[in-house]
Amino acid sequence: MKTIAVVIASLIAFSGIGHAADVTAPVKEIMDATKSNWADNNSDWTDIFDASRLDHLYSRDFVARYQAAAQFPAVDDDGISPFDYDVIVNGQDACPLQDLTMAATPVVNGTAEVTVRFQKSACSDAPDAKDYTTVRFEVVEEDGKPVIDDIVTENIETQARDSLKATMALIAKGQ
């Protein structure tokens, strides 16, 4: 009887997005694009919210919020983004990203958290140049695949966590 309970517990523990799919896959795609954007290779800027990425990397709720916020574009060259900064580096300026690490937590209540840490100002002479930026991606399963449901950055000055979905909701309200 104990063996059956252990097998059932194991099946429950490994069910969900953590077992069948790599919860880091959508985050890796976003971080690869972000690394390329800030590299010294003069390549074209990759929009992490272009239609093809919205279609397969983000949850339906995230996409709906992004599309609502996109009705209020920030001042930029193409006039379609609701952001006037890079939401991953949480700023308008960065160096090539250094010492990037990624770690995923187990799935809890249908959500896995993928934490990414990197140095965004390593090429700078500023006192905080070696500080790490932490970005947390909340990943859920939709239609059998992992998708990003929120991107949460940590504000170094206030120690607060800033949800991109909450920011998009404010933008959509014209705030």
Image (cartoon, rainbow, N blue to C red):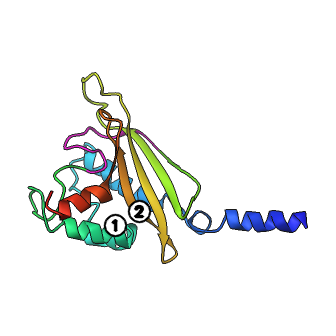
Work out whether mark 2 precedes mark 1 in sequence or the reverse, and give the earlier one. 1
Kindly identify which numbered label has been placed on residue 62.
1
Looking at the picture, tell me which residue is in the foreground, 61 or 122.
61
Whole-percent x and y of residue 56?
A: 38, 72
Secondary structure character of the magenta stretch overall: loop
76 with respect to 90 (left or right):
left
Looking at the picture, tell me which residue is in the foreground, 62 or 56.
62
Looking at the picture, tell me which residue is in the foreground, 37 or 24.
24
Kindly identify which numbered label has been placed on residue 126.
none
160 with respect to 115 (left or right):
left
Q: Residue at x 54, y 62 (%)?
A: 22
**Three-letter amino acid code at disc 2?**
Ile
**Secondary-structure class at tag 2:** strand
Q: Residue at x 31, y 35 (%)?
A: 158
Question: Is residue 53 in view from this perspective?
Answer: no
Marks 2 and 1: CB-CB under 8 Å?
Answer: yes
Residue numbers of the magenta segment: 87-101
Q: Which quarter of the rendered picture does the N terminus lie within? A: bottom right
The question of residue 96 being in magenta is answered with yes
Whole-percent x and y of residue 161?
A: 36, 45
Looking at the picture, tell me which residue is in the foreground, 116 or 142.
142
Q: Residues within 10 Å of mark 1 (few under 14, many from 20)?
A: many
Instruction: Kindly indicate the quadrant of the structure image that contains residue 171.
Output: bottom left
**Three-letter amino acid code at disc 1?**
Phe
Up-down relation of residue 55 to residue 39 (above or below): below
Q: Residue at x 24, y 23 (%)?
A: 125
Q: Residues within 10 Å of mark 2 (few under 14, many from 20)?
A: many
Up-down relation of residue 98 to residue 147 (above or below): above
Residue that label 2 marks:
148
Query: Of all residues shown, which one is farthest toward the right?
Result: 1
Question: Is residue 102 in view from this perspective?
Answer: yes
The question of residue 88 being in magenta is answered with yes
